[in-house]
Image (cartoon, rainbow, N blue to C red):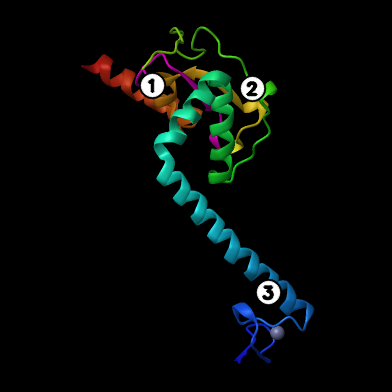
Amino acid sequence: MKPCKVCNKLTRSKYGICKRLPECLSAYQKACYNAHAEAYRAGSLKFYQAHREQILPKQHANYKRRGPVYAAFNSAKNKSVRLGIPFDLTPSTMPVIPSVCPILGIKLAWTEGPRTNNTPSFDRIIPTLGYIPENVWWISWRANRLKCDATPAELMRIAIVVAQKVNAA
Ligand SMILES: [Zn+2]
């Protein structure tokens, strides 16, 4: 017997929490849920690691079949959870990929192998606003790299200062 973590009355119950009081019961259910959620996550991670070779090509084939816009949708969704930012897109409200980068005017195109300057890149215009329809667009990987998470004021400063230096040289 141990004192219940919530009410301190002696208990033999699992997780060291009794089920006498409503507070105890809800803490017990939470502990039970967490214990299993952890086991479930650990189990699925273990399965993934053991079957990577079979799973990865299937995932890639699935993405290839559904196309790059769907892949971008999916990774944006995961990223929004990871970063804790808004997400309000569906596969059908995803913007289409233009043929030319709206920032640099260079051609947008997919190529086999590693991404290039011209690879389309799904971008949040203002990163903190998240994945909402008004805040997302497709730009070139080069433009996305240059822009990164810079604010308009920072981009202006960079342009002005670099131009001054170039002109002075
Ligand atoms: Zn208790």
Secondary element type, mark 2: loop
- Indicate yes or no whether the magenta region holds residue 59: no
Which residue position holds label 3?
Answer: 28
Residue at 34%, 24% in the rendered image: 161
Say which of 156 and 125 sits in front: 125
Mark 1 or mark 2, which is nearer to you? 2
| 44 in relation to 58, above or below | below
Give the alpha-carbon distance from disc 3 to disc 2, as whole Å: 42 Å
Viewer-nearest of labels 3 and 2? 3
Query: How many angstroms separate mark 1 from mark 3 (CA)?
Result: 59 Å
Identify which residue is drawn at 33% across, 18% down: 163
Rendering quarter of residue 2: bottom right
Spatial distance from mark 1 to mark 2, Cα to Cα?
31 Å
* Helix, strand or loop at mark 3: helix
Q: Nearer the viewer, residue 52 or 153?
A: 52
Most frequent secondary structure within the magenta stretch: loop
Quarter of the image with the N terminus in it: bottom right
Q: Is mark 2 within 8 Å of ligand 1?
A: no
State the residue position of label 1. 159
Question: What stretch of residues is rendered in magenta?
Answer: 113-127
